[in-house]
């Protein structure tokens, strides 16, 4: 519907951040800053949030 707004919630779990470490032969979450971008398209970002993953 035009001009309709909704609140959505989603959870970013560690498994969504995993990358495969070829030296250790396992999946790992790398510590550091991560940024979530939400928008209608990659050219229309409406929300940016940063979070920190500690070692």
Image (cartoon, grey):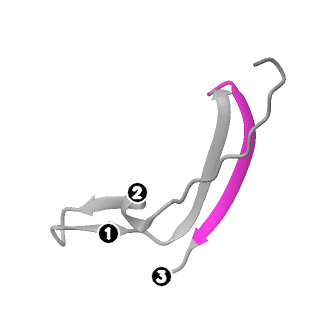
The image quadrant that residue 52 belongs to is bottom right
Q: Relative to 31, is 41 on the left or the right?
A: right
In the image, 30 versus 3, the foreground residue is 3
Kindly identify which residue carries mark 3: 55
Asked whether the beta carbons under mark 3 and mark 1 sit within 8 Å of each other, the answer is no
In the image, taking residue 20 as reference, residue 51 lies left or right, namely right
- Crowd band around label 3 with a 10 angstrom C-alpha radius: few (<14), some (14–19), many (20+): few
The secondary element bearing badge 1 is classed as: strand
User: Which percent across, then down, holds residue 55?
Assistant: 47, 82
Q: Residue placed at 51% from the left, 60% from the top?
A: 12
Residue 26 appears at what percent x and percent y? 20, 68
Q: Position of residue 31 (x, y in %)?
A: 48, 72
Badge number at residue 16 = 2
Numbered range of the magenta stretch: 42-52
Name the element at disc 3: loop
Q: Mark 2 against mark 3, which lies toward the viewer?
A: 2
Task: Tell me what residue is drawn at x 53 percent, y 79 percent.
Answer: 54
The outermost residue toward the right is: 3
For disc 1, the marked residue is 28
Residue at horizontal 36 percent and vertical 63 percent from the top? 15
Graded by Cα atoms within 10 Å as few (under 14), some (14 to 19) or many (20 or more), the crowding at tag 2 reads few
Q: Earlier in the sequence, mark 2 or mark 1?
A: 2
2 or 3: tag closer to the N-terminus: 2
Which residue occupies the extreme left position in the image? 25
The residues bearing labels 2 and 3 have C-alpha atoms spaced at a distance of 16 Å
- Main SS of the magenta segment? strand
């Amino acid at each position: 519907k035009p001009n309709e707004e909704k609140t959505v919630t989603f959870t970013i779990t560690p498994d969504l951040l995993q990358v495969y470490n070829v030296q250790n032969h396992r999946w790992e979450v790398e510590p550091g800053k991560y940024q979530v971008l939400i928008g209608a398209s990659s050219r229309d970002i409406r929300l940016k949030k940063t979070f920190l993953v500690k070692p």
